[in-house]
Amino acid sequence: MCATLVGWFANPFVSTLISVLLGGVITWLAAWIYYKKAGDDLKKEAALLKKATAAIVYFLEHPDAEIEVRRDVYGNPVGLIVSATGHARGTSMAEGVAADASDS
């Protein structure tokens, strides 16, 4: 049986075919691992950009707000501290009926 396998591998067509198939599987596996990692990194970056876009839109809608950027140890922005002040103005009005004390 072993001699039969050696006979198959001695054939240049079979050994080339097996080498091509094995090389294709290894190449596919390496590419899949690389692109899986790249896709995961891209998803993380897209999530950060989505948050940054929301912060920019908030700042454009509220130009009077005071915004301070929070950063991690590497200097990358990780959040915002937003403080805003508001003003309130009001009026009041009272109505009533005066009663004459002499009628009591």
Image: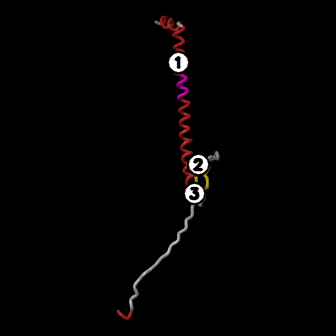
Which secondary structure, mark 1? Answer: helix
Q: Is residue 90 magenta?
A: no
Tag 2–tag 3 contact (CB < 8 Å): no
Q: Nearer the viewer, residue 100 or 16?
A: 100
Task: Report the span colored magenta.
Answer: 21-32
The numbered mark at residue 37 is: none
Residue 53 spot, x, y in % from top left: 56, 49
Which secondary structure, mark 2? Answer: strand
For the residue carrying disc 2, how many other residues have a C-alpha within 10 Å: few (<14), some (14-19), or many (20+)? few
For the residue carrying disc 1, how many other residues have a C-alpha within 10 Å: few (<14), some (14-19), or many (20+)? few
- Single out the residue that lies furthest toward the left: 104
Q: Where does label 1 land, which residue?
A: 22
Which secondary structure, mark 3? Answer: strand
Amino acid tagged 3: Val
Magenta stretch: dominant SS? helix
Q: Where does label 3 land, which residue?
A: 82
Q: Residue at x 51, y 10 (%)?
A: 14
Q: Which quarter of the image is occupied by the C terminus?
A: bottom left
- Pair 2/3: label in front: 3
Residue 69 spot, x, y in % from top left: 61, 53
Q: Nearer the viewer, residue 85 or 53?
A: 53
Q: Is residue 27 magenta?
A: yes
Q: Residue at x 57, y 64 (%)?
A: 85
Tag 1–tag 2 contact (CB < 8 Å): no
- Single out the residue that lies furthest toward the right: 75
Q: Where does label 2 land, which residue?
A: 78
